[in-house]
Image (cartoon, helix red, strand yellow):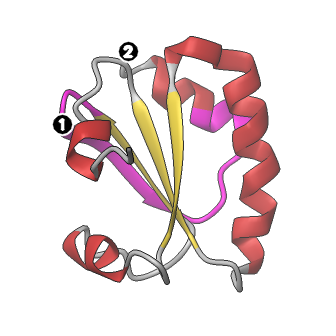
């Protein structure tokens, strides 16, 4: 059974949402960076990738106008949001500051 988005973001550990698209060059740059973030942080973070083309309603609800757009949620609250590619350490610092 697939979890709904609202269930996913209600987690009490930070959930990093990566809104991306297959056709997006910067998204392809970000993907391995996020993989390294997950390897470094392990259970301290959940990383969920959402394809904006397959989830247009959700992308619309969160007003995602450019990809990649990352958002950090915890307990259902949006804590941070930024579009574009960030370096691994920047992402880790943001997640750690919202533990």
Q: Which of 61 and 89 lies nearest the eye of the viewer?
A: 61
Q: Looking at the image, is 45 positioned above or below residue 48?
A: above
Q: Looking at the image, is 21 positioned above or below residue 12?
A: below
- Which residue matches tag 2? 99
Give the number of the mark in front: 1 or 2: 1
What residue is rendered at 36% in x and 74% in y? 64
Q: Is residue 65 magenta?
A: no
Side of 22 where 48 appears, left or right: left
- Residue 14 occupies which quadrant of the picture? top left
Q: Are marks 1 and 2 in contact (CB under 8 Å)?
A: no
Residue 83 image point, x, y percent: 49, 65
What residue is rendered at 52% in x and 14% in y? 44
Residue 81 image point, x, y percent: 37, 52
Q: Looking at the image, is 76 positioned above or below residue 50?
A: above
The residue segment tinted magenta is 74-91
Classify 10 Å Cα crowding around label 1: few (below 14), some (14-19), many (20 and above).
some
Mark 1: secondary structure: loop
Mark 2: secondary structure: loop
- Which residue matches tag 1? 76
Question: Real-space Cα distance between discs 1 and 2?
Answer: 14 Å
What residue is rendered at 75% in x and 38% in y? 35
Q: Which of 83 and 9 lies nearest the eye of the viewer?
A: 9
Quadrant occupied by the N terminus? top left
Side of 90 where 36 appears, left or right: right
Residue 24 image point, x, y percent: 69, 81
Q: Which of 87 and 64 lies nearest the eye of the viewer?
A: 64
- Residue 92 occupies which quadrant of the picture? top right
- Residue 99 occupies which quadrant of the picture? top left
Comes first in the chain, label 1 or label 2? 1
Q: Is residue 86 magenta?
A: yes
């Amino acid at each position: 059974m697939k979890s709904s988005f609202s269930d996913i973001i209600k987690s009490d550990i930070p959930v990093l949402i990566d809104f991306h698209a297959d056709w997006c060059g910067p998204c392809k740059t970000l993907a391995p960076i996020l993989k390294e973030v997950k390897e470094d942080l392990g259970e301290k973070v959940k990383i969920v990738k959402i394809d904006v083309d397959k989830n247009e309603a959700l992308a619309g609800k969160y007003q995602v106008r450019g990809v990649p757009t990352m958002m950090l949620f915890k307990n259902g609250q949006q804590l941070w949001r930024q579009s574009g590619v960030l370096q691994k350490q920047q992402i880790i610092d943001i997640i750690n500051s919202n533990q």
